[in-house]
Structures are given as structure tokens and as C-alpha cells.
Image: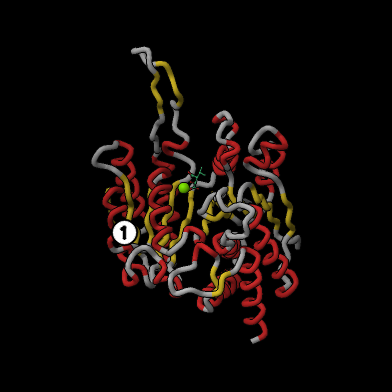
Amino acid sequence: MANPSLLVLPGDGIGPEVMAEVKKIIHWFGARRGIHFDVTEDLVGGAAYDVHGVPLSDATMQKAMAVDAVLLGAVGGPKYDVLDFSVKPERGLLRLRKEMDLFSNLRPARCFDALADFSSLKKEVVAGLDIVIVRELTGGVYFGEPRGIFPDNEGGRVGVNTQRYTTNEIRRVARSAFELARRRSNRVCSMEKANVMESGILWREEVQWVHDHEYPDVALSHMYADNGAMQLVRWPKQFDVIVTDNLFGDVLSDCAAMLTGSLGMLPSASLGAIGPNGRPKALYEPVHGSAPDIAGTGKANPIACILSFAMALRYSFDLGAEAARVEAAVEKVLADGVRTADLMGPEGGTPVSTTGMGAAVIAALDARLEA
Ligand code: IPM
Ligand code: MG
């Protein structure tokens, strides 16, 4: 049987630095666990623009469609701020999401015990937190038409974006949230703005429909997204799985990320429909961005990217036990006080660079094998 295939797209800013640590872990799995991947590497974002004049070439897009899973670092940087909107680095990422039809974006926010003191919220609010935001990723205001900047009839201009959701788009992401909830604490909270938006009314009705017809065993609640933002900060442990649209999901997942202490900790999986190979189309990426301010300084935390690879093991390759192995190694390293700059709280710890953190995770993986 052929090895599973991975396309690695390090991208911009700290992307290549954090991905370098993930590549070491991929290599570790081959050397120490006999789990081999065929890895191809390519360009995305500003790095692709510099070479091809576009943030994602057609050739790279084809590779992404052909592999079993894509691992992405980060895209964007100040150097590219001046570019036309159509070739900005982010467009490369959005093209991957759209053309791979990755409609379900899983963003877990889990607070590791060792970091509970480190959140900007009180320890009792975040200790033991383990929630997942399921963000719709291929619809809504990110892609809705009409969109653009047009002249208005007063001699000025008008900026237009369209929030648009169909029954099918809502139902399919709702199903993925209910499926996930069944493997967890069996609770889903759906968030929208049904009090002001028709698309929100439809969202609420369709999520309820999927629940009533297909997942009556799962506890479903609905919440306005603004209240959801408040509740996430007030008492996040009330949630298990949150399902929401593309834009609310973007905002709420950054908020949830900070509950865990650092944006440098959060992985994500973007999944599409199950293909003929029995696997979903899939892209895995850290929730953090390219962090141009610290790129090249060795300060970046590779854990979000490492945990994104763990999600690939679980969701693309059915290697849940191997994913747990990576997660346990990360937990061990954090418990031992190993800290990149973003994790350095008042209690101190052992300061490490990006590569130092990668090496510590590999040492923990080794230690566990030898134990
Ligand atoms: C994210 C990011 C992206 C988004 C940007 C980089 C286009 O913020 O993945 O959350 O808005 O979706
Ligand atoms: Mg975002």
C-alpha cells in the first residue's frame, strides 16, 4: 500500500519556522513508529507571490487536490499589504479552502493544566477547558456575491459584502458538529444573529431541523453570537461543541484561543466531504497567523502547528492513538515548564526557542517510547 501523502505549505512569516519542527516530527514517525508519509513541499501566500505572482499557483492547487492531507503554516505579512486584494497572501488560503470545499473547520480550545495560570482569565474559569468551535468555512460573507467597492450615487463609494447561506451549506456543517459532539460530551450550541439577520433565522431553523431529524440524542441549544462572545469569556466550560458561521467563527475562535493562554497553542482542521479514498479532503493549520513581528527571531511557538499535525493523524489517517501520543508529549513538555516566549508567565520556566520546543517535544516522544 502506498504511503499516505502530505503536501506541506509553510507559507510566510513564522510559518516556515514552525513547520520545520513539524517536519522533524513527521520524520520521527517514520523512524520510530514505522509510519511513513510521502511529503511534498510547495509555496503559498506571499512566498508564492514572490515566485509566481499569485498567492497560490494552479500547479500547487492541483497538488493540494491530489494529496491525502495539506499542512499549512501561515500566510501574510506587511510586505504584501500594498498588493491588490486579488493577489494578497490570504487569497491563497481562501482559494484552498474554497476549491477543496473544506466546509467544516474544527478549532479546539483546550487549556493545558500547566498553562491555566497563564490565561488572562482567572484560573478557575479556564482550568480543564476543552471545547471545539466548528466554523463554517466556505460560505457566508467571506464568499457571498455581490461583493466589491462601487461608486455610490452621492459621488462617494459603497463597500458591499453579502452574507448568504443555503440549506445545504448549513445542514452539512451542522452534521459535522453533531457527529463531533457524539464523540465528546454530546452537546452543541449553535450561534448566529437570528435577531437581526435572515441568514441567521435560516441558520437556526436548519440546525434545528438536522437535530430533530438526525441527531435527537444530542443536546442542542441556540445563542446569539454576541451573547456567545460574552459567555465564552464569562464561563467557557458551559460549552462542548459550538457551531457557527464563517465570520462569527473567525472572531469567536480567536476569543476562545486566548482562553487557553496563547494563540500559539491552537491547532485547526478544515475538512470537506469524504472522498473515494474514504478520507475527507483536509487541510490542517495553526489558528495563529504569520506573526511578522517575531518572524526570524526564533521566538515562535511551534505547538499549534505540531498539534495541527496531530489532528491530521486523527482525522485524515485514523491514527487517534498516535495523535494522542503527540498531544501527551506536548502536555509533558508544558508540565516540565518548557516555555517559548509567548508562554512565559510570572511563574517562570525554562525559556526555549522554536527549535528548542520542537526538540523538547521529540525528546518527550522518545521518552515515552522507551518507558
Ligand atoms: C483565520 C484567519 C483567516 C480568516 C485569514 C488569514 C484569511 O484569520 O483562519 O482565522 O479570516 O479566515
Ligand atoms: Mg481568524
Residue 256: image x %, image y %? 39, 57
Image quadrant assignment for residue 185: bottom left
Rendered view: 248 above or below 176: above
The percent position of residue 330, horizontal first and vertical second, equals: 55, 72
Q: Residue at x 28, y 54 (%)?
A: 230
Compared to 280, does 238 lie above or below?
A: below
Q: Which residue is mark 1?
A: 233
In the rendered view of the protein, which quadrant contains the C terminus?
bottom right
Q: Residue at x 35, y 59 (%)?
A: 188
Callout 1 crowding tier (Cα within 10 Å): few <14, some 14–19, many ≥20: some
Considering every residue shown, the one lying at the far left of the view is 195
Q: Position of residue 257 (x, y in %)?
A: 43, 58
Question: Does any portion of residue 359 appear in the rendered image?
Answer: yes
**Colour approach in the figure:** secondary structure
**For residue 205, what is the image quadrant?**
top left
Element on which disc 1 rests: helix
Front residue of this view, candidates 275 and 138: 138
Residue 217 visible at all: no
Residue 159 in percent (x, y) is at 40, 25
Which residue is depicted at the point 26% across and 51% down?
227
**Residue visible at 46% across and 57% down?**
107
Q: In the rendered image, which quarter is residue 162 located in? A: top left
Residue 188's place in the image compared with 130, above or below, is above
Report the quarter where the N terminus lies: bottom right
Name the amino acid type tagged 1.
Val
